[in-house]
Image (tube, rainbow, N blue to C red):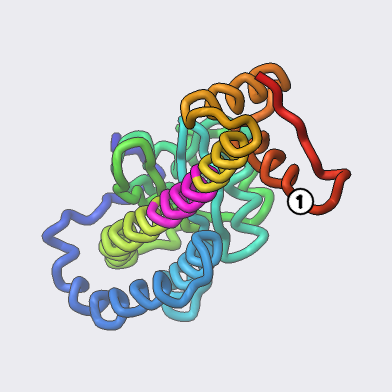
């Protein structure tokens, strides 16, 4: 990050070592609990934003946190610790750039120490200043290829984050990124499981329908499958839906009967 007059020096990684043990105790366990205890990904993101705000607030102070995820080049605030925090992110998206988007783009922590004197994003800075924001910290979260994210932290005080605060946020970001990757992979596995179950149900319905057609038309399995495909194409209906109709056709209810001809 280029040095600017209103931007405090970010601590080197070596400077973060003294605080590493402090944020490790209980934090990793809490993040793991979030994965295990939340009902779905949205609940996880929300709990992560709230936990971030409580953990990273300076003594006697308050911060607001968002989690931004970029997929297919589109940034989305997936969770916020407060309505105020979400508004700050939406303003950033509206202006097209800002500290949090820059953190995602560069993979580096971006610190706006004093919003009133910010020169890189003057219009955005003026807009958030009207909401009482004094300083902003954007911490990138390293995810798998195809996705990127950041933890966006807002303080009402100018120079609201000390070097130690920034070091804590970066270390927390590293742990959060690992947990976030785990959560996203679990979501992918669940989606794959649901897709597989749907495919199996579809395959079962098709197999049953083929059997019905074979019995009705006294034909081979290949011929029955061909009949099913022709019906699907002629009606512009998915094969599994046509199969479901065939199964319904053997119902005692005459209204559900469907006739297939070669």
Q: Is residue 112 left or right of residue 90?
A: left
Q: Position of residue 38 (x, y in %)?
A: 49, 72
* Left or right: residue 13 compared with residue 153: left
According to the picture, the residue beneath numbered tag 1 turns out to be: 251
- Categorize mark 1 by other alpha carbons within 10 Å: few (<14), some (14-19), many (20+): few
The verdict on residue 121 being magenta is no
Q: Which residues are magenta?
A: 189-203
Q: Does 192 lie within the magenta span?
A: yes
* Left or right position of 47 against 18: right
- Compared to residue 86, the image places residue 167 above or below, namely below
Tell me what residue is drawn at x 17 percent, y 54 percent: 12
Measuring from the top left, give residue 217's x and y in whole percent: 63, 30
Drawn side of residue 92 relative to residue 247, left or right: left
**Residue found at the far front of this picture:** 218
Q: Secondary structure at mark 1?
A: loop
- Kindly indicate the quadrant of the structure image that contains residue 213: top right
Seen at 58% across and 55% down, the residue is 133
Seen from this angle, which residue lies furthest left? Answer: 14
Relative depth, front residue between 46 and 15: 46
145 versus 48 height, above or below: above
Q: Which image quarter is the N terminus in?
A: top left
Q: Quadrant of residue 234?
A: top right
Whether residue 157 is visible here, answered yes or no, is no
Regarding residue 162, the answer to whether it shows in the image is yes
x and y, in percent, of residue 61 in the image:
50, 74
Q: Which quarter shows the C terminus?
A: top right
Residue at x 42% of width, y 73% of height: 34
Dominant secondary structure (helix, strand or loop) of the stretch shown in magenta: helix
- Residue 83 position in % (x across, y down): 67, 60
Q: Nearer the viewer, residue 119 or 177?
A: 177
């Amino acid at each position: 990050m280029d040095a600017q007059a209103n931007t405090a020096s970010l601590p080197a990684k070596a400077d973060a070592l003294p605080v590493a043990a402090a944020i490790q105790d209980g934090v990793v366990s809490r993040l793991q609990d979030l994965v295990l205890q939340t009902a779905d990904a949205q609940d996880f993101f929300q709990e992560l934003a709230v936990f971030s705000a409580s953990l990273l607030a300076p003594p006697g102070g308050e911060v607001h946190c968002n989690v931004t995820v970029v997929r297919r080049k589109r940034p989305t605030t997936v969770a916020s610790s407060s309505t105020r925090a979400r508004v700050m992110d939406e303003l950033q998206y509206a202006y097209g750039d800002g500290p949090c988007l820059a953190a995602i783009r560069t993979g580096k922590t971006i610190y706006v120490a004093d919003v009133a004197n910010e020169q890189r994003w003057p219009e955005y800075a003026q807009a958030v200043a009207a909401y009482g924001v004094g300083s902003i910290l954007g911490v990138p979260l390293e995810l798998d290829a195809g996705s990127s994210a950041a933890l966006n932290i807002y303080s009402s005080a100018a120079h609201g984050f000390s070097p130690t605060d920034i070091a804590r946020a970066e270390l927390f970001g590293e742990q959060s990124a690992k947990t976030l990757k785990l959560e996203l992979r679990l979501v992918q596995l669940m989606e794959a499981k649901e897709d597989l179950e749907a495919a199996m149900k579809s395959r079962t319905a098709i197999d049953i329908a083929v059997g019905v057609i074979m019995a009705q038309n006294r034909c081979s399995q290949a011929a029955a499958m061909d009949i099913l495909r022709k019906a699907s194409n002629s009606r512009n209906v998915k094969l599994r839906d046509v199969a479901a109709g065939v199964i319904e056709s053997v119902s005692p209810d005459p209204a559900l009967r469907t006739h297939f001809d070669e």
